[in-house]
Each structure stands twice: as C-alpha cells, then as structure tokens.
Image (cartoon, coloured by chain):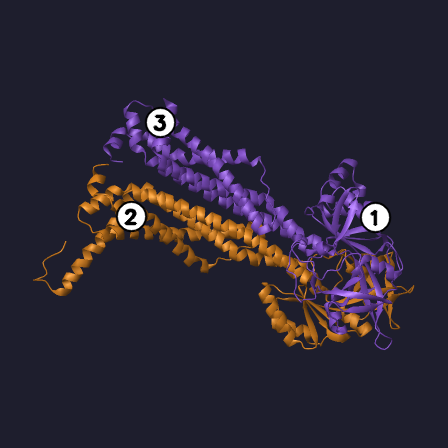
Amino acid sequence: MFPRLVYESFRRQTRRKLLAGVAITLGVAVATAMIAVATDIGDKINHELRTYGANLLVTPQEDTLDVEIGGVNLKPPSDGAFLNEADLPNIRGTFWHNNIVGFSPMLPVTVHLGNDADAKDVTLVGTYFNKPLKFVKEDFTTGVRITHPWWKVQCRDGSLPRAGRVEDSPTCGWPEDNSRNVLLGERLAAQLNKKPGDSIEVAGRTLTISGLLSTGSAEDDEIIAPLGLAQDILGKPGAVRRIYVSALTKPEDDFARRDPRTMTPETFERWNCSPYVQSIAYQLQGAIPHSHADQIRQVAQNEGTVLSRIKGLMLLVTLAALLASALAVSAAMATAIFERRAEVGLMKALGAGSFAVAALFFAEALLLALIGGSAGFAAGSLLAHQIGHSIFNSRISIEPVLFPVILAIAVFVTFAGSAAAIRRAVKFDPVFALRGEA
Amino acid sequence: MSTTPTAVHHSQIAARRTGPHVSMFVRMLIRAAVLRRGRAASALFAMVVAAAVATAMMNLYVDVQAKLRTEFRNYGANVVIVAKGGRPLPADALGKIESDLGAKTLAVPFSYAVARTTDGQSVIVVGTDFNRVRHLNHWWNVSHWPSPPRTSSTAPIEALVGMRAAAVVTPDRKPFDLTFQGRSIHLNPAGLLQTGAAEDSRVYLDQTEFQNWTDVSPTTIEIAINGSSADIEKQIAQLAQALPGTEVRPVRQILEGEANVLNKTRATLYAAAALIIITSALCVLATLTGWVFDRRRDFAIMKALGASERLVNGFFAAEAAALGAIGAVIGYAFGIGAAAWIGRANFHAPVVPRFSVFPYVLAGSILVALISALLPIGLLRRVQPALILRGE
C-alpha cells in the first residue's frame, strides 16, 4: 500500500512534483558547480599566476657578481662560471617535474654593433624560444614563450599577437631555436632604424631580424638570439649563465622556511614532498651540478597572498551559494507540502496515524531529493565544465567522491526544508482540512 | 460605497470617494499580512534572504577588484620613469610625480654607479630612499634596515648589502670601503638584502649619502600606481606630458600578470554572483507564487463582492510591491553586513557599502515580487469565483 501511495502521488501530481524537483535540481546544480569551482580555483589561479613569469632562478654556484645596469653588462663576458646546457633536461627528472611549467636558459653576451665611428656595446642574450627537448623518453618543449608570457613580438606584417598561451598565439615573428634569426628589442630597433626582415651585422655574422620584441624592461635594449648562436659568439659551446624556472608552488609557510640541513630524515621527506618553492629549488640544485637555485622573491612571495585571498573569497561565496540553494529547496518543499493539507485530512480521517503521514511525506521527499540531486549533480558538472572552459580555458575536474556528498546534502536539505511543513501538516485537524478552512 | 452626487458638493464627493477607498485598501493590505502571519513572514523571509544575498554579491563584485588590486600592489612598481640618453632626471621629478598622482602613490628614486672594492672588484652601488623602498618592495627580505639619514657627519654611513655582494665586499660583516672615480667612502653594513634577483649583487645607500659621494643623481623612478589598466594608461600619458625628456614605461610583466589574474577572478565571481542571484530569485518566485495561489479564496470573495479586475490586480500587485520593498530594505542591510564580514574575514579590510547597489536590489526585488504575484492571478482570472469558493 505504501509504495502505491508514493507512486500514485507522483503519477497524479506531476506538476507539483515537477516544481519541487526542478527547485532541488537547480539548487543542487548551483551547489555542485560552486563547490567544484571553489575546490579547483586554487589550481586554476596558480596557473594564471604563472603569467608573472619565472619564480625560480638557477645560477652557477661560484658565480661572480653581476655588474649590470639596465640590461647593459659592464663585466667581461667570459668572466665567471657557467652551467652546462646538457644538464637542462634533468629538470624534467626532478620529483616535482609535473609542477614545472617551463624553464629558459639565458646566456648574455656583450657584442659590438656598427662601425668604429658609432660603435656601441649591446647585450645579446641567447635563450630557448620554444625548444623541443627530450628527457629519457619524454618529449617536451620549453623556452621564453612559456616562462615570459608578457614578451610581445611584432612581426613583419606589423600585427601584435594577442596574449595567451603558446598554443594560441601565432608563431609569426618568433625565431626558430636553431636558426640564425634574432629578436631585436624595440628601443634598440628604433635607435638602429631596423624593422622585421632586415639583417643585422653582429660579431662578424649576418643575422636576420625576425621580429621586434617589446617587454617593457631591459630586453627592449637587447638582442635576443637562439642559445646556440650566443654560445657560438662567446666561443663557449654548451654554456648557460642562468636558468629561469617557472613552477607551480604551494604557498610558503613556517615549515617551508626551515633549513633542510637541520631536519630529521622524516621531516626532510615531508618537506621535500611538498611543492614549496624552497623544496623545488633544493631539487633543482640536485638536478643541475654546481648550481645554486633560489626563489625570485618578487614573484614567489606574493603568489601566496594573492592565492589565499582568491581562494578565501571563493570559499565564502560558495557558502553563500549553498545557503541560497538550501533556502530555495526548503521553500519549494514547504510550499509543496502546504498545498496538500486536504489530502492529509483525508488520510487522517481514514485512520492514518501521524507517523504514516510523516513517513509518506519523507519518502516522497527522499525520492525527490535523490532524483533532483542526481539531475542537479549532472547539470552542475556541466555548468562547472562550462565555467572552467570559458573562464580558465581548461577543465574543472569534478571528483566522483563529490557525488555521494552532494546527494547526502540534497537529502538533508530537502528533509530539513520539509520538516517544519510536515510537522504542521501532521498536526492539522482533519475536520478543518476537509471543510476547506485551511 | 458611492452616494448620490446631487445634493453634495463636488469636492466632498471626491473626498468621500477616495477617502474610504484608500483606507479600505490599506486595511485590506495590513489585515492580509497580519491574519496570515506565518505565510506572510515566510514570504518576507525568502525576499529578505534573496535581497541580502544579491546585495552581498553585487557589493563584493564591485569592491573585490579594488581589494585585490591593493594585494597586487605588493608585486611592486608597475610604471618606471627613466631619463632619456643617460642624462639624470630633473631634480623636481619626484615632487612633480607626487603632485600629479597624489601623495598616496609610492614613487621611489634610484641612482646607480659602479664602484670598486679594495681588492679591485666591481660592484654596483645604488642610491635610494629606504623609507619609500621598503613600502614599495614588500618582498625584499632584509635582515635589518639602515637607520634614518644620519644627523652628524661623524656617524657611520649605513648600507644595505645584497646577499651575493656581501660575499665580495664584506665577507665578515665588518665595515668596508668602496671607491668611485678616486673618491672613497667608508660604509657600515647595517643589514643583508635577499631578493633572488639582480638586487642581491648590489649595495644600497641612502640617496643623500650616495649623491655626496658620487655626484650622481637619480636616473630611474619606480612607481606603483593603483587602479584599472585604463587609469594607469591615463596616468602614464599624464606623467609623460609632465616630465618631458623622460621615458615613462609600463612594467608589462606586472601589469599583464595582474590584469590576467584579476580578469579570471572577476569572471568567476561574476558567474557565481549570477548563479546565486538567479537561484534566490527563483526561490522568492516559488514561495510568493505559492502564497498568492493559496489565497485564491480571498481573490474569489473579492470578485464575488463586486471588486473590479483592476482593483483585485492592484491589490495583489500593491501587496507584492510592498513585500518586495520591505524585503529589499531589510535584505540590503543584512547584505551589507555580510559583505563587510566577508571583506574583514578575507581581506582584513571591510568592504565599503555601495549605495549605488541599492536601486538595483530594490528594483529587482519589486520586479520579482510583482511577477510572482501576477503570474498566479493571471491563471485565476479565467476561473469563475464560484468554482473556487466551492472548493474545486
């Protein structure tokens, strides 16, 4: 009899059930989408913060002082120590290689430009643009197009590529990594009166300017060339001066700042297995012989605050969303039950106890919550996917474990929302209900 | 309620006609709310919650950008002014910048020279204003900032020494000498500086001391401008006009990083706000529709007693509008409170109440209330009052 009552109630009151079901679906969808976004926003913003560029710098251990003002190096170029280019792919072999978004080696060389009359010293920096590399069996590409996303190259047809990922931006203007093409800083280009496509005489070599580089800092006065070319000019094959590494890190805390040399093996294990900027630096030093790795504090130190602010904000907004959807569900349930007083009166007049009536309503609520919750979870996943795709251009992952949690929340909220209305309905005097004096 | 107009003065008729009508109308409104306290209260509650959530979200959406921008200023300068062609900047440049951008803008002068240590190594010495630079570059890890400019000429001159420079100039942290174009200076290392970038290989001095020693005046001023990209662009143009002979450059790394992260956050918040506001509006719609639908007996009785369609519609519309307005006012107050709390909890600074949000909340609340009242009325209008009263 009981299942039949529930079944008939759904069959005969399709409109009302649909209304309550829609409310639950909507509430659950919003809650699912917001929870998914809030749990994933940290990762997403961490990725976006990589637009600030590298947060780690690897230098030779016995490096002499940089004597560089505004991009002009005042030190004899062959001075000091170098890192070995052949060690670079090892960066992919560190424990946190999945967190390393990219890296770019740099080799500045001072070169003479022009004839004796108006000769001038200019810095030529050798680097990777988007260089294919191989570590053991894994192929990957890296270079300044990943680690320095704010570098803009103006190519021959004068158009500026739009900001964004490497895959999105056109390759126009960027030199090939093994070519003799270079980028010319825009201020230097204005001084020399050169444009893309022209050739330039550097250290006895004729190089082609493939594009003009605009960065808003020292590079605007420099020549950026493929690394091999810079090594060739310097006469030191395989030499690299410093490596910029862009890595996804966990915000620094007190534990992160501890000195790994004073840790016990277990603490060290824990420290080394957290993607702190310090532990990644420590591993980079291990991967590249005779190197010293340190965080670039301007970039690394501020990430934590920005990240925690945005995460905190989304968490609070998610709470607001949960509250709003819980209220929507409760309101819909309360209305649905309130409208059925006559039915309650009839059941009670026929001898149903308060328990039987309450059980019927709760069973209906449970069914509605399960159906609406499942539909809402699906819709919410779709919504989260849409938000991730349109805002962050990447997938927002939804943990399957969220499904039972969401269903449980849906059932709880539906029960909580119906409880007051059911109590009132059960207490109602059947005589008044049947007389229509509700 | 109408009387025969023949004997009575014209104005009295008008007074009588409107008088009882208005008072009756208001009485009906009040009695409807008082007699069915429970349902009216739950409808009002839904209205208040929806208005509060909407207010909080809109307030946050407007204010969070300003809050986040302040956080982003921790990344340091976003505009750099450099002298063209190696000449020093005009002496009044800093004053001009501050008068142009307001005293709250942080502008820090820098001057550079290459000095030699006693054993002949080159090191870059930078003159700056420590007081300003420590507010601009929060990420500088400094063991001890040099004390304010000395008052007597016998006191030692304090310097801030970069981590890597320290290994060269003062490996034992003792006072050291530097020479620049034959003139030497005796410096006391006050503290060590660590940034992980070029600053680590430099020695920092107070600008006055630096200028007394080297005669080099500032060539670079770094500025942190707070505002949207359009604001910053405008101020860059303004600065370029005020300081001819200099080059005003935006620091693209900082500007683009900020714009990117801010845009993504704003878009996410926008999506969240839209979802939440739609959900709460639908919640109100469901509750109010149920409430009005429940009162089909009132509707039928009013019609049976001869009330015109306009009067009945007006009654329910007025009721809904009043509910919307009251809900909006109370909800606005709660929403401001919620936004302030979120601001305090997350940004350690309260979100400023935006009164510009109020008209939107009010209009939205009344609109939703009106829709939810007139929707069921539209359905009921087609039904004969007798059918409703008979309980069918």
Q: In the image, is residue A265 above or below residue A392?
A: above
User: Secondary structure beneath disc 3?
Assistant: helix
Q: Chain of mark 3?
A: A
Q: Verify CB contact (< 8 Å) between mark 2 and mark 1.
A: no
Marking on residue A357: 3
Label 2 marks a residue whose chain is B
Q: Which residue is mark 1?
A: A87
CA neighbours of label 1 inside 10 A, class few (<14), some (14 to 19), many (20+):
few
Give the labeled residue for mark 2.
B378
**Of all residues shown, which one is farthest toward the left?**
B7
Residue B161 shows in the view: no
Asked if residue A29 lies left or right of residue A208, the reply is: left
Q: Colour of chain A?
A: purple
Q: Work out whether disc 2 and disc 1 sit on a shared chain.
A: no
Cα distance between the residues tagged 3 and 1: 75 Å
Residue B103, by quadrant, is: bottom right
**Chain B colour in the picture:** orange
Q: Three-letter amino acid code at disc 1?
A: Asp
Q: Check disc 3 and give the amino acid type.
A: Val
Q: Separation of disc 2 and disc 3 at Cα?
A: 33 Å
